[in-house]
Amino acid sequence: MEVSEKEMIRTLTNSLITNEKLMYPVFGAIRKKQSKVTGRPNDFAYIALTNLDRLLLYRFDQFSSFMEYYTFDTLIMGDVSKTNLGQYIVELSFLTDKGTKDITLVFSSSVKGFDFPHQEVNSELLYTEIDMKII
């Protein structure tokens, strides 16, 4: 699987619904609660918001991939932080039909070794937008 901004936009755009627009897509990771099966503490992810107040998460690794959607009207609580090295950490809890879903997103202002020319701008905008939604 190619990992690039072009592929990220294509993948996330395929999940949009009618009249929905993609906002602030970034390459990052989603921390796993348990890593017993794979031994890896994170899944790679394409992360974005939409103009219809949805959070899109496309998780992937070398074996599988899947899309998740959350709406901010089901947000129970959240916290955002930024490290001195330009890494953003976003912790969110959503109410779902199966109970509470806790998600920790991690993304950086730059991606070394991959083609993500808008990562710096989008990561700051994504962080700011999510921060405004959880206040």
Image (tube, helix red, strand yellow):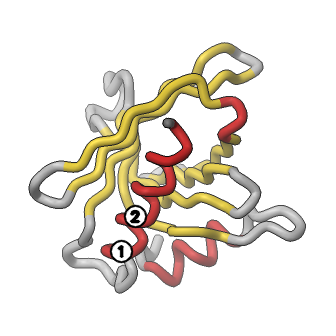
Q: Amino acid at mark 1?
A: Gln
Instruction: Give the camera-side residue of 4 and 102.
Output: 102
What's the residue at 42%, 78% (across, down)? 4
Residue drawn at the location 61% of the way across and 50% of the way down: 55
Q: Residue at x 48, y 32 (%)?
A: 92
Image location (x, y in percent) of residue 69: 67, 45
Of mark 2 and mark 1, the one earlier in the sequence is 2
Query: Measured along the vertical axis of the image, is residue 78 above or below residue 21?
Result: above
Among all residues in the image, which is located at the extreme left?
84
**2 and 1 marks in contact (CB < 8 Å):** yes
Work out whether residue 46 or residue 23 is closer to the camera in this orientation and state it: 23
Question: What secondary structure is marked by label 2?
Answer: strand
Left or right of residue 78: residue 31: left
Amino acid residing under circle 2 = Phe
Location of residue 53 with respect to 8 vertically, above or below:
above
Q: Which mark is residue 27?
A: 2
Query: In the image, residue 58 lies at what x, y percent?
Result: 56, 54
Label 2 to label 1: alpha-carbon separation: 7 Å
Position above or below: 130 against 46:
above
Q: Is residue 114 visible?
A: yes
Q: Which mark is residue 119?
A: 1
Q: Is residue 57 positioned above or below 95 on the image?
A: below
- Which sits in the foreground, 135 or 27? 135
